Amino acid sequence: MLELVTTKLEDVANWGRKFSLFSYPFVTACCGMEFMSVAAPKYDIARFGAEFPRFSPRQSDLLMIVGTITEKQGPALRRVYDQMAEPKWVIAFGVCASTGGFYQNYHAMPGADQVVPVDVYIPGCPPRPEQVLDAIMLLMERVQRKDGHSQLRLKREKIVLEQQRALDDD
Amino acid sequence: MSQRVLDALKAKFGDAIVATESQHGDEVAVVKRDKLKDVATWLRDDKAMAFDTPVFVTCIDLLDWRPVKAPGKPSSTRPEWDGVAPRFEVCWQLRSLAHRHRVRLKVALAENDVKVPSLTPLWSGFEWQERETFDMYGIEFVGHHDLRRIYLYDEFVGYPLRKDYPKEKRQPLVRRPDLVGDH
């Protein structure tokens, strides 16, 4: 009975989380224009409850990496990600944040996932607002499933379980 | 356009001006390295020249130089001054707002000797651009008061805009600890 109540509680919490994603916009390049357009009334991510950018990593649970990440920015990005409280999710917005895009040189990082784990990648240079909305919907599904690459707590639980199992086998 | 600047330079400095050329309305004077400071000081202070505005500093790496073939034109020859084919050319573009003329000073450098006098003491607007040229090409500006990297991080080894820097070589500061075997 207790198990049933706690899982249902978790579901309710995830339902709440998915409709109130507070994003931290890590905006570095031209994709920022498209991000503004998505946030503005015409495309309006407020319909998905994700309209409120928090410029403090402590208060946000969605890291939006918008634009090219250079090797020099790597430590700053990692620090912002580390400062965010769990549960947290990451979206790579645009082809530069996803793969490095057309940069293949000394300064551009080949995708922000070299430094932080990414849940949803949005292609496009820059992506259409519809693609961004699609990505947010995809992410909402993951939030409801309690899923995500960046969920360190879940990973830790999994590791502990595996260790427990290995001990039991012995 | 500013041919009279080149003529005046040649009349005043003679041998110190190694070569001159004019292309698309841009006048270029190749100057001997040890005379650069004198030439630049004169260009700034002379009433008839009065170059008051620094426009840009940059460098050209001639490592992969090949002749340009255009129909109906003689193929270009590799620049060669004092019997040495230079690896680098450092350029300073100057402009006079008073007389509305401009000129580009060039200094040719061999590969193993990349020291060049800094023009920052004359035009302080060159400060950051000379730092950038140092950052990207490793040109050492003697007399610059604060010559250190401006864009790249201190851990970076080498000079990325040199033609012999590997195109895809990256020097990461951080990588994910869990990147291997995660997904």
Image: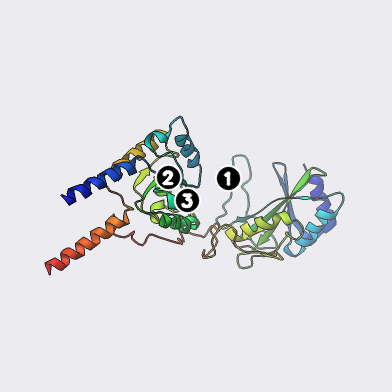
The disc at residue A23 is 2
Judge from the rendering whether residue A78 lies leftward or rightward of residue B156; answer left or right: left
Judge from the rendering whether residue B51 lies leftward or rightward of residue A125; answer left or right: right
Question: Where does the C terminus of chain B fall, quadrant-wise?
Answer: bottom left
- Subunit ID for the residue under disc 3: A
Q: Are marks 2 and 3 in contact (CB under 8 Å)?
A: no
Dot 3 crowding, Cα within 10 Å, few <14, some 14–19, many 20+? few
Query: Which residue is tagged 1?
Result: B69
The residue drawn where x is 36% and y is 44% is A121
In the rendered view, tell whether residue A169 sits above or below residue B69.
below
Q: Amino acid at mark 3?
A: Ser
Asked if badge 3 and badge 1 are on a common chain, one would say no
Element under label 2? strand
Element under label 3? loop
The residue drawn where x is 63% and y is 62% is B139
Query: Which residue is tagged 3?
Result: A56
Viewer-closest of B79 and B148: B148
Dot 1 crowding, Cα within 10 Å, few <14, some 14–19, many 20+? few
Image-quadrant location for residue B129: bottom right
From the viewer's perspective, is the residue at label 3 or at label 1 nearer?
3
Q: Amino acid at mark 1?
A: Lys
Percent of width and height locating residue A118: 36, 50
Asked if badge 2 and badge 3 are on a common chain, one would say yes
Percent of width and height locating residue B20: 74, 51
Viewer-closest of B89 and A132: A132
The residue drawn where x is 22% and y is 45% is A8
